[in-house]
Image (cartoon, helix red, strand yellow):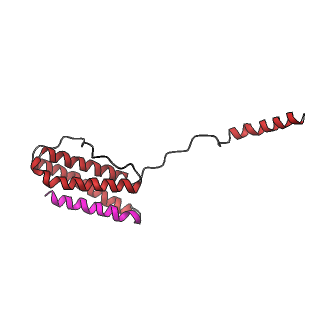
Amino acid sequence: MLRAGGLVALGGVAVPLAGCGLFDRDEGPPPAADPLHPLLDEALALAASYREAAGAVPELADRLTPIAETHESHAAELARVIGATPPSPAPSATGTPPAGADAALAALRQAEQAARNAAVTACAAAPAERAALVGSIAAARATHLEALK
């Protein structure tokens, strides 16, 4: 009779434990995306745009390839800092590169200007340990604008 009472007591304890959340697999909402992730995506998109423009307008390749490489190195460093998977070679840009050197440079200037503004905003909001990296990316994007004139 004591054994039966002990089993009933254990059974009574086991039922509430099963419903208390100890065995639930729900881990809550996924962590928020890192605030620097948009800069990573932007760096990859810019690199792809420069590579496409250099391919479409070969006379600009010597001018645009180093800028594409800079954006790729920024993407690699941002991925390292935020703990993302390091980027593979830049994916294709979403649009068709403009025909002609002037049109290609104008489109790249517009994209670079928007990217520089985003980097400046991100730098102002970044914690101290990330501000130097984001500030250097903003400065590089500003110099790219000058190189595209």
Q: Residue at x 71, y 41 (%)?
A: 17
**In the drawing, does residue 22 fall left or right of residue 46?**
right
x%, y% of residue 5? 86, 36
5 to 125, vertically: above or below? above
Quadrant location of the N terminus in the rendered image: top right
**In the drawing, does residue 106 fall left or right of residue 122?**
left
Residue 143 within the magenta-colored segment of the rendering:
yes
User: How many numbered dots are placed on residues in this image?
Assistant: 0
Residue 99 occupies quadrant: top left
Magenta-highlighted residues? 128-149
Q: Residue at x 15, y 51 (%)?
A: 106
**In the drawing, does residue 49 fall left or right of residue 18?**
left
**In the drawing, does residue 124 fall left or right of residue 24?**
left
Q: Residue at x 11, y 46 (%)?
A: 57
Quadrant location of the C terminus in the rendered image: bottom left
Comparing 18 with 87, the one in front is: 87
44 to 146, vertically: above or below? above
Q: What secondary structure prevails in the magenta region?
A: helix
x%, y% of residue 33? 43, 50
Q: Residue at x 26, y 54 (%)?
A: 71
x%, y% of residue 136? 29, 63
Residue 120 within the magenta-colored segment of the rendering:
no
Comparing 28 with 68, the one in front is: 68
From this viewpoint, which residue is outermost toward the right?
A: 1
Residue 62 occupies quadrant: bottom left
